């Protein structure tokens, strides 16, 4: 059984192989190549795993799942935070040829049910430390609703579902069986603007190349000691080059449970970490901590700070080398594929003011106007791209794919960008109805649909508003039958089971929503109202 996905046309696939982008290796090679190494792979609090121990735990878990009837071509839903078990589970599933969706730890009922409905997982792996799984109420309901689930494993469980028990039980007869390299390895989460979260099928070939090339650009080696303070399942934290890139090189990944300076600075000092990845709001927190007197000497080992997930202001960028005392690298990428980096030897003005260049010679990137026509260099328009690690279609989403791709297979990301004469990209904003709240993507339609379930809400529109710390926050404009306080709106959404970061930061009641000439809600006008109020 193989998982259906939109394949690259044969002539493209052939070219990508001929040029060495696709090496027909499974992602499990990242780990198996170091299986006999005693170097430290993962630091998680007081726990450390060598590559040998890491590989053994992966095979143990894979064997346990296999013994329970889990087989190649099936799917899994995983929700684990920044813990060693996240990586052990990921590679164990790959060893079996099972494609996981890695939900973020911030996700709640709504997101988990949406993912399960799409992939029909046979395995659920989660954490008793998550509010949904501290008891069994949600778990029992979930398994009743999603009949495909045959196996449940829980981190921190004391009984039959204990993930730790499965990781410790050895089976010398286990033989790995990853899916072929040109098949789906796992699903990435889209921050897309539609009401249902979209899933991005990533093959071994395309993701392996993305990691390998990222390693080359970022100079990742066995000496890299990487602080992962972003959610482990984020594409940025996984592959740009992220933890998987560090594992590929034989380096060390230290996990942080949050990006705060109080947590991260001592970790960097204790383990002599030399690289970290952050989103702009976390950079602001680090800089503020230093300004407030935090011990900057704790950062002495740090040589490279990557910043991505949302646009970094030039003002903030200039402060990083001056105040944190390390090199900045800007990253602009997407879970759908394309990744751009500033180079380590780029001129300071490029590093401060742009989001870098595409990393592959066969990344085809151009800027389109609203009618899909190419725009000249320097003009702002819609980002269009295709290439050896950029997907060709969302999972089981033919209608959405019809609008997300042009006739030549170029993906329209919804980002508004300009490309200069040297090929450097600057991100200007978003075209799609999506809010980027400090690197966390909020689909406006999803929240609007939930708001409309409230008996007092007649119409709802969610728009972005500028914020100096997070880049964007969200404001819900409501037409209501009776007055609704912001606290009531947020409580209602919590009860619908959505992630906390998706709750509106502000709620405004209006008599009517402004409309465009074609009868759609005029969100430009709503954002203008917000801007005028901010100025006034």
Image (cartoon, helix red, strand yellow):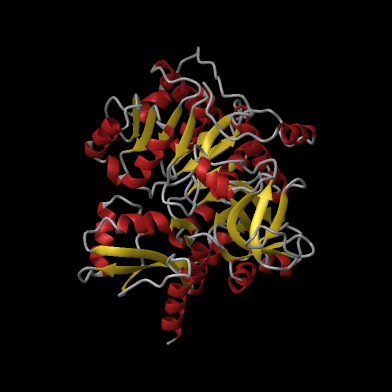
Q: Residue 390's image quarter? A: top right
Query: Which of 187 and 458 lies nearest the eye of the viewer?
Result: 458
327 lies left or right of 79: right
Residue under the point 38% across and 65% down: 461
Above or below — where is 470 with respect to 55? below
Q: Residue 111's image quarter? A: top left
Q: Is residue 327 at least partly visible in the picture?
A: no
Residue under the point 30% across and 50% down: 497
312 lies left or right of 155: right
Q: Residue 395 at x, y = what percent?
A: 51, 38
Q: Residue 283 at x, y = what percent?
A: 53, 64
Q: Residue 14 at x, y = what percent?
A: 76, 31
Above or below — where is 430 with respect to 64? below
Query: Which of 117 and 304 lies nearest the eye of the viewer?
Result: 117
Q: Residue 420's image quarter? A: bottom right
Residue under the point 45% across and 69% down: 523
Q: Is residue 15 at least partly visible in the picture?
A: yes
66 lies left or right of 456: right
166 lies left or right of 489: right
């Amino acid at each position: 059984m193989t998982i259906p996905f939109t394949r690259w046309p044969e002539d493209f696939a052939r070219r990508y192989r001929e040029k060495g982008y696709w090496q027909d290796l499974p992602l499990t090679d990242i780990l198996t190549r170091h299986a006999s190494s005693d170097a430290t792979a993962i630091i998680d609090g007081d726990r450390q795993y060598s590559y040998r121990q890491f590989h053994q735990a992966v095979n143990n878990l894979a064997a346990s799942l296999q013994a329970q009837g889990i087989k190649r071509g099936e799917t899994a839903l995983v929700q684990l935070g920044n813990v060693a078990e996240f990586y052990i589970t990921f590679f164990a599933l790959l060893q079996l040829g099972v494609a996981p969706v890695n939900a973020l730890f911030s996700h709640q009922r709504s997101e988990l049910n949406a993912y399960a409905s799409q992939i029909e997982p046979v395995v659920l792996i989660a954490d008793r430390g998550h509010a949904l799984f501290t008891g069994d109420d949600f778990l029992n309901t979930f398994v009743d609703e999603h009949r495909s689930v045959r196996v449940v494993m829980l981190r921190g469980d004391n009984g039959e579902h204990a993930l730790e028990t499965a990781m410790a039980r050895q089976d010398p007869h286990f033989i790995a069986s990853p899916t072929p390299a040109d098949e789906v390895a796992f699903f990435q989460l889209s921050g897309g603007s539609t009401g249902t979260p979209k899933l991005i099928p990533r093959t071994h070939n395309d993701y392996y190349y993305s990691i390998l090339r990222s390693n080359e650009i970022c100079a990742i080696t066995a000496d890299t000691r990487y602080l992962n303070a972003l959610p482990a399942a984020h594409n940025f934290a996984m592959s740009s080059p992220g933890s998987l890139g560090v594992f590929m090189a034989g380096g060390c990944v230290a996990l942080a449970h949050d990006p705060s300076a109080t947590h991260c600075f001592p970790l960097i000092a204790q383990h002599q970490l030399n690289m970290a990845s952050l989103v702009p709001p976390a950079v602001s927190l680090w800089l503020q901590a230093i300004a407030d007197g935090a011990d900057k000497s704790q950062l002495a080992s740090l040589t490279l700070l990557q910043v991505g997930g949302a646009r970094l202001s030039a003002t903030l960028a200039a402060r990083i080398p001056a105040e944190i005392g390390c090199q900045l690298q800007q990253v602009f990428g997407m879970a759908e594929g394309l990744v751009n980096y500033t180079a380590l030897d780029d001129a300071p003005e490029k590093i401060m003011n742009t989001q870098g260049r595409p990393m592959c010679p066969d990344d085809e990137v151009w800027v389109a106007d609203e009618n899909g026509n190419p725009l000249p260099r320097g003009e702002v328009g819609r980002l269009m791209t295709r290439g050896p690690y950029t997907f060709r279609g969302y999972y089981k989403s033919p209608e959405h794919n019809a609008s997300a791709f042009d006739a030549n297979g170029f993906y329209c990301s919804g980002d508004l960008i300009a490309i200069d004469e040297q090929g450097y990209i600057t991100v200007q904003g978003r075209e799609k109805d999506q809010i980027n709240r400090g690197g966390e993507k909020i689909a406006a339609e999803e929240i609007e649909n939930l708001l409309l379930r409230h008996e007092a809400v007649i119409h709802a529109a969610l728009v972005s508003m500028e914020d100096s710390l997070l880049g964007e926050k969200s404001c819900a404009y409501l037409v209501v039958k009776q007055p609704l306080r912001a606290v009531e709106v947020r409580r209602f959404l919590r009860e619908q089971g959505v992630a906390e970061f998706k709750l509106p930061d502000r709620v405004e009641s209006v008599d009517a929503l402004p409309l465009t000439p074609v009868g759609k809600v005029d969100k430009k006008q709503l954002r203008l109202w917000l801007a005028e109020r901010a100025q006034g």
